[in-house]
Amino acid sequence: MFKLTILKQSLLAGIIFFILGFLTLPDYGVNWDTINHLTRGQAYLNYFLTGNKDYSNLSSFKPYWQKTDTVLLSSDQPKDKIVRRSMYQIDSYDYQYFVINDGYGHPPLSDVLSSIPNYVFFQKLGILNDIDSYHVYGIFLAACLVSLVYFWFAKYIGIIAGLVSALSLSLYPLFWSESHFNTEKDIPQTVYSTFFLFCVWNGVRKRSPLWVLASGIFFGLGLGTKLNIVFVGLIAFVWVLLFWSIKAIRQRKYFQKVLTPDFLMSLIIAPTLGLFIVYLSWPYLWADPIGGLTGVINYYHGIGTAASSEWSWYAASWIVYTTPIIILLFSFIGLLISWKKDFNKELLGVLAAIWFLVPIIRVTLPGSNIYGGVRQIMEYVPAMALLSGMGAQWFYNKLSKRFSSFSLKIFFVFVFVPLTINLVVIHPNENAYFNLLIGGLSGAKEKDIAYWGNTFGAAYRPAVGWINQNAENGAEVVMAYELMGNIPSIWLRPDLEFSNLYRSGYLQNGEYAVTLTFDNTKERSYYDMYLEDMLEPIFQSGLNNVSVVKVWKNSPEYLKFDYEEVLLESSILRKTEYGLLFDLKDENKLSRLEVEYYQSDCLPLDLGFVEYSKDGSVWQRIPGALPVDWRIAVLREQPKDGYFIEPFIAQSARYIKLILSPTDTCLSNVKNYKIYVFE
C-alpha cells in the first residue's frame, strides 16, 4: 500500500470506505426528518429537470413491498410491474407547495442532491431500491472526506498522520453510522465544511485565487445544506488573520505581495459565489430573497439559543463519552502539540485545533442550545480525526528511533483493531455508542445522560425485517409513539395493516408495536408505559445489554405477570376548584377509570390532565393532555359522547385527580363512574 503515491493511497482509502458503506446500507433505517427533506428534494429536482410544478409528468405511485435486506431493487413484484416513482414524490407536496411553504427550516440543496442518485439508479436504471438510492449521496460524500483527510495530513504532516486520521474518521461511531442515513443535513454539512477549509488553507498559503474561488463553491454547498458553515467561516477567518499576522511579522511588505488585484477580487467573489449557489438551489428564495433568508435565520435562532445564563458542558461531555478511547487519546495529544513546528506547517496544526474547539465552545457558551447528542456540530469530527493523526505521528516520531518503520505502521493499524471489532459487534447501532469512561451505553443509561440510546431512526430497519418475517398474515402494526413516516411504508409486507390508529392498549387487540427505546421514551405516553411495564418484547436490538429498538405483540400471552381486574366496590368523588378528585379510600393498583357524564348545557373540554397520588400531597401526572392525546387510539378521542375512559398501568395510588379546563366542562357533570383495579 505504501508504495503507492499519497494521492493513490487516499483514493484507495475512500474507495474502501465507500464499498463497505454501500454494502452495509441495508442495515440502517431512515432519519426521522427524511419525510420532510426528501419530499422537498424531489419536488425541486423534478422542477429543475422538467420544468413541471407538479407530478403530472409521472405515473401514479403503486404500492409494493421492497425487501429490507438488500440495497438492490428487490420486490414482491416483477421489476417491469413496479412503477419507478419514489414514495417521496407526493402529489400534495410538489413544487407549488414548497415554493410557498418552504420558509421555516434548513436549506434544501442536499435534499435535491440526495434525490439525484434516486433519480438515476432507481427511477431511470431500476438498479437500486427507492430508499437506499438516496443514501448513496451520503456514503459518497463521506468517502470523499476520508480520502481528503488522508491526503491532507499524509502529505503535510506524515504518512502515519494521514493513515490514523483516515482510520479515526472512518471508525468514529457517529460518523460511520450517520453517513448511512443522515444524508440531507449533518453529513453533507460536515463534508462541505472540511473541503471549504482545505480550499481556504490552500488559497491563502499559496495566494491562489482559484483555490479561494473553490472555497466559495464549497461554502455555498455547505450553506445550502445547513447554516453551520457560517461558524466554519469564523474558523477560517480567525485562522487567516493569524496566518497573515505571522507572515507580516516575518516578511516585510508581505501584504503588498499577497493582496494582488486578482487575489482581492477572489476574496470578494468567493462568498458571493456561495450565496449565489444557495439562491439558485432554493426556488422559495426567488420571489423574496431577503424575507426568505430572514425566516431561516429566525429558525436557527430559535433552535440554537436558550434563555439559560449558565455554561453548558453537555456537548463537551458527550464528545468525551462517545469518542473511542484510542481516538480520544491520540486527539488529546494532537491538541497539545498542534502548535509545535513539526506539526504546524503553514499553521495546519493551529487550524485543526481552532476547527475542533470552535464548534464545541459555540454550544457551551451561555444562551446556546444543543440537543440530541452532538450530531448537530458534527464538523468537529474531521478536526478531531486530524488531531488524532497528529498525535499518532508524534508517537511514531518518538518510537521510530527504536523500531522499524514497517513494524510501527503495522502497530498503528493494529491499535484500531479492538475498536473495529467493537463496531462490528454493536452494528448497526454505532451512533448509540458510549465508551468505557462512562461504562458504555448501560453506564450512560444509569447516569441518565440526555439522549442516551437515540439512534434517530437508524434502528427501525432490523425491527421491520423481523416483523416481515414473523407477523401473521393481515397483522396490524403500529408505532408506539413516533410518526408513521419514520418507517417507509414500502418496507412492510403488503398484507400488513400499518396505522397508528390500531394502538389498543389494555384492550389487547394483538397489534405489533415498534419503537426506538432511549432516554425517557417510557414516559412519553400511556401506550409507551403500557408496553414497557406490562408486556415482554418479542424482538429487541441494542448494545451493552441496552435495547435501542423493540417490538411488542399486544396480546395476553406476552403479559409480564398474571393479573385479575376487579371493580372497586367503594370510592368517593368530590368536585374541586380544579376539576374532579376520586378517593379510593385505600391504596390500590390502578387499572382503569370510566366516567359517564351529562352533556347538556355545558362546555366541551379544552384541556385536561390526569394525576394520581398515594397520599394526596405528592402527585404524578399521566403523560399527554386531553382531549388531543389519544390514550387508546382504537377508542379515538376522549372524552366523547358522554363517556370517558382513562387507562392506567398498575400504578399504586389512593387518589385520582382530573384537572379540567374549563372546570365546568361536561366531563365534570358525572352521571356515573367505575374504577377498576388489579388484584
Image: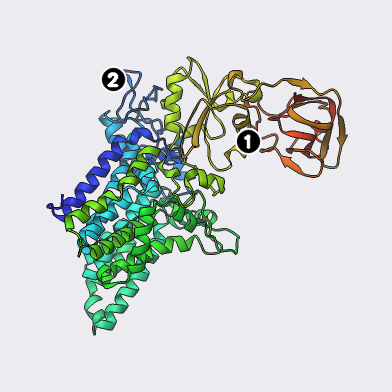
384 vs 609, left or right, is: left
Which numbered dot is residue 80?
2
When the figure is inspected, residue 121 is found, relative to residue 186, above or below; the finding is: above
Per the image, label 2 sits on a secondary structure element best described as helix
Q: Real-space Cα distance between discs 2 and 1?
A: 44 Å
The image quadrant that residue 247 belongs to is bottom left
Q: Residue furthest top?
A: 473
The image quadrant that residue 446 belongs to is top right
Q: Amino acid at mark 1?
A: Ser
Percent coordinates x, y for residue 88 in the rendering = 41, 33
Q: Amino acid at mark 2?
A: Asp
| Of pointers 2 and 1, the one earlier in the residue sequence | 2
Q: Which residue corresponds to mark 1?
A: 525
- Residue at 28 percent of width and 39 percent of height: 20
Front position in the image: 581 or 589? 589
CB within 8 Å, label 2 to label 1: no
- Residue at 25 percent of width and 53 percent of height: 411
Residue 149 seen by the camera = yes
Q: Residue furthest left?
A: 3
Q: Residues within 10 Å of mark 1 (few under 14, many from 20)?
A: some
